Image: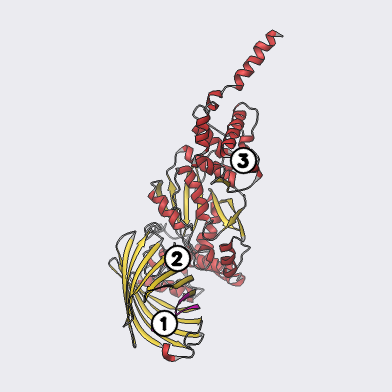
Amino acid sequence: MGFFFFFFLIPAQTNDSQYKDILLSEENIFTISNSKSWKRIINFDDENLAIERDKLYLSSQNDLDAKTELELTIKIYEDYLENKSDEICRFPARAFFVSHTFSDFPKFTAERCDDYLEWSQDNSIESISLMYVTGYLQNPASFFGHTLLKFNSSDQSRETDLLDSALNYGAETGNDPAVPYVFKGLTGLYFASLTQERFFRLSAEYQEFQMRDIYEYRLNLSEYQKNLILGFSFEMIEKKYIYYFLSDNCAYRMNLILGLALGEDPMPNLPWAAPIDLLIGLNNSGAVSEISYHPSQTTKVISAISDLDNNEKKQFRNTFKDFDKNYNVLSDKTKYAVLENLNYLKLKNFKEGNQEELERIDEKRKAILLSLDDAEEFERKTIMNQGYPHEINYPTLIRYSSKKISDKDLIHSFRLRGANFEVLDKDKTRNGNSEFMFLSPKVSIYDGKVLFEELTLFKVLSLNDRKVRIEGESLFSWGIEASRKNLSDKCYPCSVNLAKGTIGKSFFVNEKTSLFSLANFQLHQSRKESGNISMSLNLGMISYVGKSKYLIEYEKKEFESNNIFDDESLKISIKFDNSFNRDYGISLKKSSDYEVFQLDLNFYF
């Protein structure tokens, strides 16, 4: 019996205390459990649970604290190392954190964690990229752009990154239309979750169906940082969150994951979370090693057509007029341009469910492809991007304005604008001149009084001034607006609630200049018997000169009832680009019976 105790129980006691020295430092445990990284891992924010799910915790939620949860995590990691339990496999981020923080522990390798190994593709993920999808003005959920993570595999058998996996975050909207989406998204009436998808599905959705460009920001991460992102994403996958359009969205979730690995959140701590804020912060952090460009189908068509000479462009246009044209007489460049345009039309008609037109397009695509069989090898031109999304003014704006209306007192105003953009803003990744503003307030001081002068609830304007016309596409300028603003400078101050719709046409002149013609219809409160309806016509030109952008606009406006508000004016606005965090603008408006001069000082952060 003594022999048995000596050779069996003594080794067992030694094994139980194998990691005793690691646990002895109560002060060390307390300090680490209060670290930002540990609390982020367990979703423990300001002594409250950010997510209340039983399976996320080892102790009871009623008396959970960060220190106890760390001690229990260390215990189950010891059990894993000693082949007693595989419970730590539910928490790979914790395992990576504990084995990295307590250096005496062996490194976590997850060799017995089948579900996690499948998630991490048997440890074949060599790097991680943040993907930025450009804004999409036809869907309010996408006005700000979109972010997701792509896990880049080291599998040499893959010829494309389309088979890589991606981590996406989105609301479960049930395809709600614009108005219900905005209301529910602002008030937290949607659930959302992180989901793992193959990148080719997301590429098809964004690049092809929605025709949006994608920019890939590949990250320079250590092995530990990469594993921490993978482990934390695995723990959070398919968990239900409350979705908020402005604050708990894709940018917010990607920021939490990236911030855990980087040690500091790349996105500034603001009341809203915008993809462009995340992108700029990540680029400024120095964590980006490479940026790649993935053009949309729209960009591919425009690039292919732009590469044609005048004679080839004429042949290209004639091809769409004559369906049975002999394609063998076309140059290779023209054939590929026609094929890209047909691919564009196929996607468009697929979305519209136009089966008859799809069959017609496929016949034409088949004829083009057959004509390429005997052609000499043709190398497609690489599509180069105009710039990168982060190369803009910082997205949050505070604007001071000084405005003088004829003989009225000087008006001092302050406007706050979040991560939106106006038509004179610099942004090389936008398709044409466009504008998007959301929940932007303006406060003014006039005649010794403080006025809540404006609130732009929602404003979208897309001039659609593309330099190349895609066959089969009707490009109209359009816009919608819901706001509270001054009815007319003639009766300042006279703010009213209004809704506005815009339709028109723009004309691309050259790389720096576009012309436009817009018709506007407004419904608004009546002031001084103005009536509730007004209409206006705008003719204008937008042009770049050096680093400055000019807007020259003629407007004729008529009201339903009281013609004292009817107006005809000419306005010139100039914005001078100084740097990423400041610029200024001036505007001069000459009306039939008054003048307006305004100076804007813009500060971005």
Which amino acid, mark 1?
Ser
Nearer the observer, 259 or 318: 259
**Residue 447, relative to residue 204: is it above or below?**
below
Which amino acid, mark 2?
Val
Q: Is residue 307 visible?
A: no
* Lower sequence index among marks 2 and 1: 2
Q: Is residue 88 visible?
A: yes
Q: Secondary structure at mark 1?
A: loop
Which image quarter is the N terminus in?
top right
Magenta span: 484-500
Residue beneath disc 2? 301
Q: Position of residue 367 (x, y in %)?
A: 52, 66
Nearer the observer, 259 or 457: 457
Q: Is residue 400 magenta?
A: no
Which image quarter is the C terminus in?
bottom left
Residue beneath disc 3? 64
In this view, the residue farthest toward the left is: 546
Q: Is residue 498 magenta?
A: yes
Q: Secondary structure at mark 2?
A: helix
Q: Position of residue 68 (x, y in %)?
A: 59, 36
Please tell me how crowded label 3 is: few (under 14), some (14-19), or many (20+) other residues with Cα within 10 Å: some
Which amino acid, mark 3?
Leu
In this view, the residue farthest toward the front is: 448
